[in-house]
Image: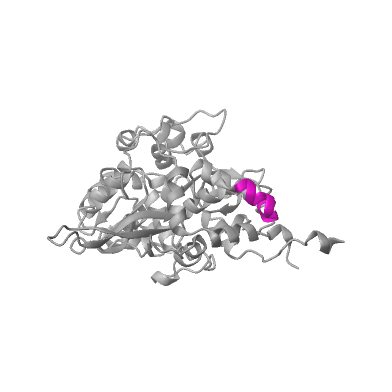
Amino acid sequence: MEDPKKCLAATKKLLEETKLRTALVTLPSLQVRSDALPKLHETIKLKSNTTVAEALKVLAAYNILSAPAVDASTNEYIGIIDVMDTLNGLLLSVYPELLREGYVQTHKRLSMTELETIGLDFSSQTIATLVHGGDLWYRGDRESTLYEVVQSGFRVGLPPKVHSPHHHLRVHHRIAVFDILPGEETPDGPIPEWQITDVVSQTDILRLLASKMDVLAAKDQGMGASIAELGMIQGIDAVATATADTPVILILARMHKEKLSGIGIIGHPGGKLLGNLSASDLRGLIPEKFGALALPVGAFLLMMHPSNAGGMHHHIEKKGETRVNVTYEDALLDQLPASVKEGRWDEALAGLPLLCCTPATTLREAIELLVQQGKHRLYCCEESGHAVGVVTPTDILRAIVLASKYEPLSPSSNK
């Protein structure tokens, strides 16, 4: 008999029984958006002839990481464009040498002004060649379930270490949904056409689970199991980290080479976890500030997460610490705080928001933390502050998809 602590049968059943079309009605009420942001009256779509600069400004304006892309001529769906796609494009077309082993050790560090100039030039190209594949699902389909979206759309069943440039062997973080709606008017009436109406992400599925958590936790022992019991602790050596003085552009190159979705930031080799760099931390980056990619990642994170960010970001503030602020203009003039200039990273990054848990954190708590804080990475740390694991929405959904079929014994069977 399988371990009852890994039982997630009720959660799995919920996904199997919830139709996609039903979830699309519920999900908007579970999403929280700041009043400071423009209202999303419809799903943001970008045309293939949109420039990188224009695309990044749209994503920044709505504080989103990605958007569906459609062909400028036919209006047909061609994939999804996100912030990481544009930065990977910058690496591959402008700085492919950064991806070569040993290049960094033998060449000078890139300057902010150089990156700013080259970045603006790169951003004048269109997004057509930068989009990545993403499944397209029909809103009106009466049969598609959330389980099928998670399994076939997100492909979370793939082993964690399987990476491939091929669309069918890649884990996806979101899918696009289309509907057939009235299009161009003709004498005989409007011509029906496909239109992208929604985007569903892995985090959206976690939001739905969190909204029903009391019921799920009462039925599934797995929700009360610790992430350690569920095998989500990889060990110190398995958690990818970089020191805070590493230029952002070099970390992005490493993430691209190793197919990483994020990297933990430490003050010195073997040091405790101080921060994280992932796609979420690039939210709001525009071409005019591409020079910031030349900054040490510690300074970059302080710039992207100012202490007066207000409703623009969901943070867990570290209590009792004084936040250090860095602006783009300060960095250009080399007027950085002393703790940053002198590499006193434990001090400089002490107030940086960081979402952490312990090996004893339950699966339920992990889901609720990710949803409440609007994050995609939850670091598991020991008392010493060293990271021993990372929990992502993909990890959680994979655990549910691969959940044990264990069924608790009925009362009569216990006699």
- Percent position (x, y) of residue 215? 64, 49
List the single residue furthest toward the front: 188
374 and 117: which one is in front? 374
Q: Is residue 97 above or below residue 313?
A: below
Picture quadrant where residue 136 is located: bottom left
Q: In this view, does 363 lie above or below 3?
A: above
| Range drawn in magenta | 213-224
Instruction: Tell me if residue 323 is in the magenta stretch.
Output: no
358 and 4: which one is in front? 4
Q: Which colour scheme is used?
A: one colour
Q: Is residue 292 above or below residue 254?
A: above
Taking the image as shown, residue 133 lies to the left or right of residue 397, namely left
- Percent position (x, y) of residue 376? 49, 50
Taking the image as shown, residue 155 lies to the left or right of residue 380, namely left
From the image, give the main secondary structure of the stretch colored magenta: helix
Q: Residue visible at 65% across and 43% down?
A: 384
- Percent position (x, y) of residue 268? 53, 46
List the single residue furthest toward the right: 415
Q: Residue visible at 42% across and 71% down?
A: 168
Does residue 273 show up?
A: no
List the single residue furthest toward the left: 187
- Percent position (x, y) of residue 19? 48, 59
* Quadrant for the N terminus in the image: bottom right
Picture quadrant where residue 327 is located: top left
43 and 101: which one is in front? 43
Taking the image as shown, residue 12 lies to the left or right of residue 351, namely right
Q: Residue visible at 44% across and 67% down?
A: 170
Does residue 374 show up?
A: yes
392 and 239: which one is in front? 392
* Quadrant for the C terminus in the image: bottom right
